[in-house]
Image (tube, rainbow, N blue to C red):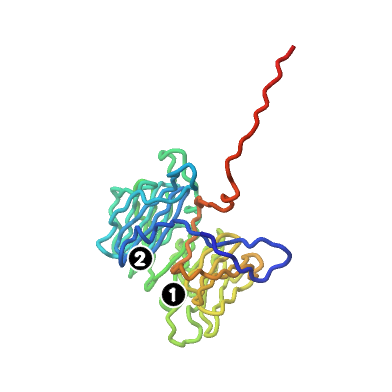
Amino acid sequence: MSYPTDVGPSTGNEVPPFLIQDLVSAIEHDLGTGVSITCAQALGTEVYVGCSNGQLMRYALQANNPDEPMRYDLVSRQNATADRPIDEIVLVPSIFRALIFADHQLSIYTLPSFEMTNIKPIRNAIAFAVDQEHLKRPAPSNESQLVPVALSIIKRSGIALFTLSDRLYYQNEVPFQGGTHARRIGHSLCVADKEFIQLVNLEESVAFPIIPLNQVGDGKAVKPFIVVISDEEYLVLSWMGASTLGVFMNTSGDPVRGTLQFESYPESICMDYPYIITMLPNNTIVIHNVETQNLVQTLPVPETIRGRALVSCLDGYLVPSNMGTDKMRKTPVRLLREQPSI
């Protein structure tokens, strides 16, 4: 089901870049009583959903009736943890793997079947980050062409560095304490602790603070957000007391571009280049252009949708649509026969 858009500052007859539409219509029925969605990801014709009870649900786009549009149907479900919420799903198509983070443990599954691999889970993890450039690699034609991806595991006493392909290889550990959230670009790791956003140079094992999470000291606890914009740029958020500041910075920590302003502290944020999409506490989604920092659209979230988070799917997925199908119907067509040659 699509929802009408409410266009923000715009000119002429521009078409708004986004609309809200159901992707998996049967999800409420499939969840069951007392179970909620905690995370999700999508790739191609499949959607993967993590639940509050530790279940992983896999949906596939299928055509059940030739006269009806295709839809996502539940094809499998499995228990990833013992009644503990699944916190994050990260898909790495270039090595046919999915990373499942739950209960301070990172488990590695196969793509697209979501079967457990023989790689032992990484335990005692606070957070993790895969090199963003490696996440964008396409899947190779066969598994003999796998190129390892770089993986960082945030632990209480440091940052453990690994490479992952069909096996997991430990590299070394960088001293760092207090990390709670991270994103990685090459040898640059942007990490949040309880007070600051910090940059860590993984080659030189050097860390330095960039900006406070809360600049007014009002005791407000804010959830850290770090968004990778390009192969050398992050976007980070900082609470200013009456509004939130979004700062673009390069991998050296220097400010670039302009800034973004939000009237409150966002509940979720992601990027679909060239747009930054942000969910605010007042049940609206605001969309800014990365290049101009202008507000280009405002979407009210329907009351029927209990918004939890915005998720960016780097390699794309298919969206079924029945828009305009009411105008399509079968009609007879006359066929022209070839005239015999004389």
Q: Is residue 38 above or below residue 323?
A: below
Q: Which residue is mark 2?
A: 36
Quadrant assignment, res 244: bottom right
Which residue appears farthest toward the left when viewing the image? 82
Quadrant assignment, res 37: bottom left
Left or right of residue 256: residue 340: right
Q: Is residue 112 above or below residue 312?
A: above
Does the image show residue 159? no
Percent position of residue 245, x then y: 56, 77
Percent position of residue 72, x then y: 43, 51
Badge 1, how many Cα within 10 Å: few under 14, some, many 20+?
Answer: some
Left or right of residue 147: residue 289: right
Point 50% across, 49% down: residue: 137
Left or right of residue 341: residue 22: left
Q: Amino acid at mark 2?
A: Ser
Point 56% across, 77% down: residue: 262
Percent position of residue 310, x then y: 48, 65
Locate the C terminus and report the quarter of the image it occupies.
top right
Q: Which of the two labelled residues, at mark 1 and mark 2, occupies the earlier sequence position? A: 2
Percent position of residue 289, x then y: 63, 66
- Comparing 163 with 50, the one in front is 50
Does the image show residue 156? yes
Q: Which residue is mark 1?
A: 223
Between tags 1 and 2, which lies in front?
2
Q: Is residue 65 above or below residue 276?
A: above
Label count reads 2
- Comparing 274 with 174, the one in front is 274
Point 44% across, 40% down: residue: 145
Element under disc 2: loop
